[in-house]
Image (cartoon, rainbow, N blue to C red):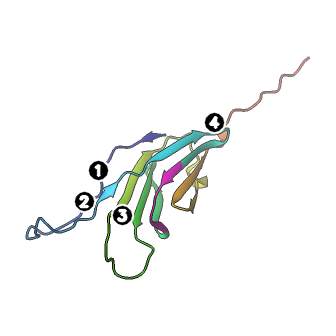
Amino acid sequence: MAEKTVAAPDIQTPNTTESTRHHERYVAPPVDIHETRDGLVVLADLPGVAKEALAVRVDDNVLTIRGHARHAVPGDVTYREYELVNFFRQFELNDKVDQSRITADLKCGVLTLHLLKAEEVKPRQIEVRVG
């Protein structure tokens, strides 16, 4: 699985927009990728992203992770030292990944993706017959 380098989605703004206005920003979430016997496990850090604001898609062999972070505390902000940003990252998949069996879990701001190997590429023991 290789990361596909793409620019963050363009935000359409009219030419009359002031340059001081806040634009939506996207950053690539840090990920860890582990290879297991059955496939790959991708761990992506997505702090502040709720399940409802997370989209994980596979389209034309490209796995896309897009998350919109929001503060969980209700009410108006009185003071803020950091701003949450939105997340966007894409990975190009090859034919060794069974795209129909990808699963995703989100827990405590960590997205866990399980990308299982396609059946034909899994290593297997070949029986040797005598005789």
Query: What type is the residue that disc 3 sits on?
Result: Leu
Q: Is residue 106 left or right of residue 67?
A: right
User: Which dot marks residue 121?
Assistant: 4
At label 1, the amino acid type is Ala
Q: Is residue 76 above or below residue 21?
A: below
Instruction: Estimate the spatial distance between the alpha carbons at disc 1 and disc 3, rounded to whole Å.
Output: 19 Å
First in sequence: mark 3 vs mark 4: 3
Let me know if residue 61 is in the magenta part. Answer: no
**Viewer-side residue, 96 vs 17:** 17
Residue 91 is situated, as x and y percent measured from the top left of the image, at 43, 46
Q: Residue 103: which numbered mark, if any?
A: none
Tell me which segment is drawn in magenta. Answer: 43-50
Cα distance between the residues tagged 2 and 1: 8 Å
Q: Residue at x 29, y 50 (%)?
A: 7
Q: Which residue is mark 3?
A: 84
Residue closest to the eye, 50 or 7: 50
| Amino acid type indicated by mark 2 | Asp
**Residue 7 marker:** 1
Image marks 2 and 1: residues in contact by CB distance under 8 Å: yes
Marks 4 and 1, the one that precedes in the sequence? 1
Give the Cα distance between marks 3 and 4. Answer: 40 Å
Q: Quadrant of residue 106?
A: bottom right
Give how far apart the Cα atoms at labels 4 and 2 are: 37 Å
Which of the two discs, 4 and 2, labels the residue nearer the N terminus?
Answer: 2
